Amino acid sequence: MTRVTRLAPSPTGSLHLGNARTFLATWAMARHGGWRVILRIDDIDTPRVKPGTIQGAMDDLRWLGIDWDGEPTIQTHRATDHAAAIAELIANQKVYPCICTRKEIELAASAPHAEDGGLVYPGTCRDRFASIALATAAAGRAPALRLPVPDQVFKFVDECAGERQFDLASEIGDFVIAKPDLSPAYQLACVVGDSAAGVTDVIRADDLLASVPRQVLIYDALGLADCVPRYTHVPLVVGEDGKRLAKRHGDSRIATYREIGVPPGRVRALLSRWLGIDCGDTITADEVKGRFDLRRVPREPIIFTAGDEAWLRSVN
Ligand code: GLU
């Protein structure tokens, strides 16, 4: 069976060296193994979608030599599938309505910050309302829908990050799968999109490790346990302060390097070194594909240094 993976950019900002490294890893691992690669635009966070970023992401990927099979899929075009999945979870009583505000959750949270930076929901509305209608009547507004997590430890083996475990009650907590307007949360949209596309392998940065238990629980709740993909989480690219690459670390957008005349082979060379590939000042996409070896991908966070930035720009 052909393995299938996906490039899943969020069009809420431009591709920078951090996202580009993840996409190069995904592409190289897949093409090295002869897998299918699809492009999925993760645009469900509609208010934050910035005009031009979808086209920009595609241009940046192509410039780096990263290709995909077939037409891109757009998450918001799957509204019918999202609604069907939400309706199924409601009908099978796999989710419950929650009327808590963010402030209430903050006040009640026993463990204020989960590993992924979110709050662990203390379960206030679990077993509280017999139906969505009763929750709506009690709050005077529509509720969100949460999937309850069992009180157990979830263990899995990540292809890159190794053996991992999460205590579901204290580290994950019941999580939102649909917002009050019944639009899907990222976790649900991701599972619906991946399962519909037959994705066998999810490759992304390790800031999303805590999404694994949530997504596996959704697969189970939808009766799709056989479709759970293999997970490969590569270390996050951070600035010299150890924080996730962002604007404060300078302008590391792929489009900027392209505009100032840095050749793509040079950007690929930096990204490739971050994937444990030995290379000189330039490397072709074919060479990245040929030399990619997951065993050589560093297991520690990748630090984008001022020296890297100066080296990248030194061709000008
Ligand atoms: N769209 C997400 C991001 O850009 C990736 C989600 C995923 O790979 O599951 O962070």
Image (tube, grey):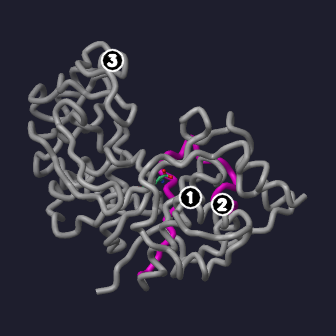
**Magenta-tinted stretch:** 35-56
Residue 182 lies in quadrant:
top left
Residue 119 lies in quadrant:
top left
Please name the residue shown 67% across and 78% down the image: 284
Upstream in sequence: badge 2 or badge 3? 3
User: Mark 1 = which residue?
Assistant: 274
Please name the residue shown 32% across and 43% down the image: 178
- Name, please, the residue furthest toward the right: 316
State yes or no: residue 26 in magenta.
Answer: no
Q: Does the residue tagged 1 have its C-beta within 8 Å of any atom of ligand 1? A: no
- The 10 Å Cα crowd at callout 3, few under 14, some 14 to 19, many 20 or more, is some
| Rendered-image quadrant of the N terminus | bottom left
Q: Name the side, left or right, on which 182 lies relative to 71.
A: left
User: Mark 2 = which residue?
Assistant: 270
Please name the residue shown 34% across and 21% down the image: 101
Q: CA separation, marks 3 and 1?
A: 37 Å
User: Mark 3 = which residue?
Assistant: 106
Residue 295 location in percent, x, y? Answer: 39, 67
Q: Name the side, left or right, on which 100 lies relative to 21.
A: left
Give the residue type at disc 2.
Leu
Q: Name the side, left or right, on which 19 lies relative to 253.
A: left
Is residue 106 shown above or below 248?
Answer: above
Residue 36 location in percent, x, y? Answer: 43, 81
| Rendered-image quadrant of the C terminus | bottom right
User: Observer-nearest residue: 214 or 113?
Assistant: 113
Q: Label 1, secondary structure: give it.
A: loop
Give the residue type at disc 1.
Trp
Residue 198 location in percent, x, y? Answer: 32, 74
